[in-house]
Amino acid sequence: MSVKGTMSLRKRQRLGFAGRLPLADGTLTDIGFDDPATADVVLRLELDDSLVDDLDPVSLDLHLRSVALRRSRYFDALLSERWNHPSVIGSGIRHRLNLKVLPSAGGGRSRGPFDVHVAVIRLLHSLDFSAAIGSVSDALEMLPVAMELLFDDCVRACVRFLEAVPWTEEEEEEVLNLVPLLQQEECEDLIARISPIVSEEGDGNCTSEEMLHKLIASAIRSHPNVATVNVKAFVAKLLSDYSSRDCVRRALDQAFLKSMEMVKDHLGKYASLDFRLSWGNDEREAMQRLNLHSSMMNAKNLHWLVERMIELRVADTAVAGWSEQASLAADLQKTFRDDAWKNIAPGLPSLIIRSTFRLANAVASGNSLAPRQVRMNLVSCWLPVLNVCRDIVFPMPTGQKSIIQDLEEAFLRIISTLPLSDSQDLLKQCLSFSTRNIDDCPHLILAFKTWFRRANRTVTKE
């Protein structure tokens, strides 16, 4: 398109220009936009061809009123300099101004090269921002022009619109690019929406990590129902897709340690002899039921957390912490030797064994690279619990391995990674793996064969 000189009235009408426009209060004004009959300023918009080669000269003349233009501090400064030397050009025109427009000022949204500038200059006359700014796209296009012209009312209107409506990811990137160009007081609300904030506790955690803590807590503390299953699946998906694995690890570590302490606390009270003797029969039974039930609920939470940590390969803290729970393991053995748990928390042994298996299997498979002492502690701590649970965890159908046998195999694989002296002591405690049937324990036979092969290996002296 090549337009030189003044645009014809027919062309202006096709673009939708009008002489009488509503003000913000809805009244009409005689301050005409692009109306030669009332204009005292001609503003020529010229495409800046200095940055583009082989670009034909393009311009657009607008007939405007100086009283409207003065709402822009940029035009106000230009007009103030010229008032001392007005030049009457004819038909009431006292001033001619030129404004260079960059070729990209159209915003790349199928607009003409001057459309955004025309829309902003029109607002100088109408102040009808609510009608002109109807989308995020409108605000993002007008805001740079309003800042260029120092049109403060338009800047505030664009920022107010952007702050109040949702954005696409692409639009958010544009907002991020514009924020540094705004005054601090103009964009405080935008900054609060898009910038991370360090927590008030001063612990260095950002709000996103705090949100992860709260989401995990909501997922594991909800009542067990279909909706809770969906919430847990949703939170698991968020954790899996989250960009910072360290942030996810810290959030899961904190939740795991808290749930583990809850299991220890309630089960410790249940297994405590002093606790049992300090209550009357009815009150003791009620408290025992509550402690055992709470232990099972927190064990469920623990199992879900272990699943997520292994899935995301961030289970190192859980493995190390689980390997140090000698007191919890002892309390579990006391509890499972008493038949009371069968009516109050029948799923507790299975939850404990499944969580232990998942952690032991993570170590055996290399998902979690645990130090030697941690590996040895994990087996020595939980092997007695496994032996107690062998007869009380429901078996799998014929021909399928039970979770007990899965855990036995995981322990034996870990034992194979230990020095011969350590593995010798632990293997002797695994003899109970053979009590079912000699044909059902090939894993135990293999473990002993491996140990004897290594023990009988001839050491070559140099």
Image: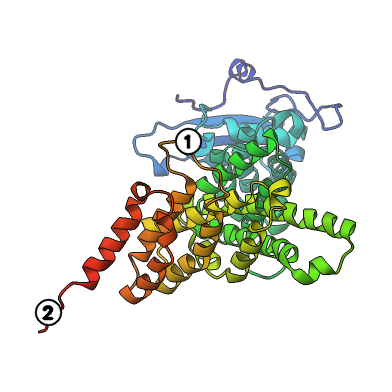
Residue 397, which numbered label?
1
Could you say whether the residue bearing mark 1 is in a helix, strand or loop?
loop
- Look at 63% across and 30% down and name the residue there: 62
- Height in image: 277 above or below 52? below
- Point out residue 154 in the picture as x, y percentages from the top left corner: 71, 41
Q: Amino acid at mark 2?
A: Thr
Q: Which mark is residue 159?
A: none
Which of the image's four quarters has the N terminus?
top left
Residue drawn at (74%, 23%), measured in percent from left and top?
A: 19
Up-down relation of residue 334 to residue 399 (above or below): below
* Residue 445 appears in the rendering: yes
Label 2 sits on a secondary structure element that is: loop
First in sequence, mark 1 or 2: give its number.
1
Q: Along the line of sight, which residue is nearer the eye, 67 or 402?
A: 402
Tell me if I can see residue 193 in this picture: no
Which of the pair 350/318 is nearer the observer? 350
Image quadrant holding the C terminus, namely bottom left
- Residue 389: x percent and y percent? 55, 54
Instruction: Find the residue positioned furthest to the left.
Output: 462
In the picture, measured across the screen, residue 400 lies left or right of residue 281, that is left
Name the front one of labels 1 and 2.
Answer: 1
Q: Label 2: which residue? A: 460
> Total marks drawn?
2
Q: Pinpoint residue 57: horizontal percent, then vertical percent.
A: 43, 32
Give the alpha-carbon distance from disc 1 to disc 2, as whole Å.
49 Å
Q: What is the x, y in percent for residue 48? A: 47, 40
Q: Nearer the viewer, residue 314 or 134?
A: 314
Give, as a three-letter code, the residue at label 1: Pro
